[in-house]
Image (spheres, rainbow, N blue to C red):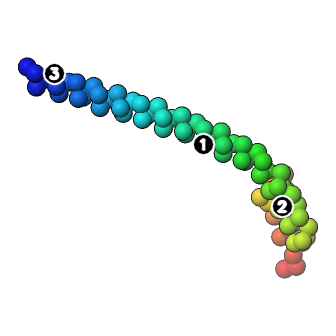
Amino acid sequence: MSWIIAAITLTLAGLALLAFLAVRVLRAAAELSREVDRTQGRLEPVRTLFGERTAAVWGRRDESVPGGAYDRDQETARRPA
C-alpha cells in the first residue's frame, strides 16, 4: 500500500512541476508577443521611409511598402514590343 501512495505522491509532484513550468512558458510567450508588437511598431516608420527612398533611387514605387505597389500591367504596356 505504501508503494501506491508513494507513486501517487511522485506523480502529483511531477504534474505540479509541469504545471508550474507551463505557466512560466505561457507568460514568457505573452511577453515575447508584446515585445514583437512593440518592435514592429517602432520599425514600421523606418521601413516605410526606406521604401520611399529606395523607390526614389530606382525611379519606381516600392511594392513592399503598403500602398506603394505599382500596376504591372501599365508598366508592361509601356515597354516596346
Residue carrying label 2: 51
- Name the front one of labels 2 and 3: 3
Q: Which mark is residue 55?
A: none
Circles 3, 1 touching at the beta carbon (< 8 Å): no
| Residue in front for this viewpoint, 63 or 18 | 18
Whole-number angstrom distance, CA of label 1 to CA of label 2: 27 Å
Mark 2 or mark 3, which has the lower sequence index? 3
Task: Give the x, y percent position of residue 31.
Answer: 60, 38
Outermost left residue: 1
Mark 3 or mark 1, which has the lower sequence index? 3
Residue carrying label 3: 5
Residue 47 lies left or right of residue 52; in this view the side is: left
Q: Amino acid at mark 2?
A: Gly
Whole-number angstrom distance, CA of label 2 to CA of label 3: 67 Å
Residue at 66% across / 43% down in the picture? 35
Mark 1 or mark 2, which has the lower sequence index? 1
- Name the front one of labels 1 and 2: 1
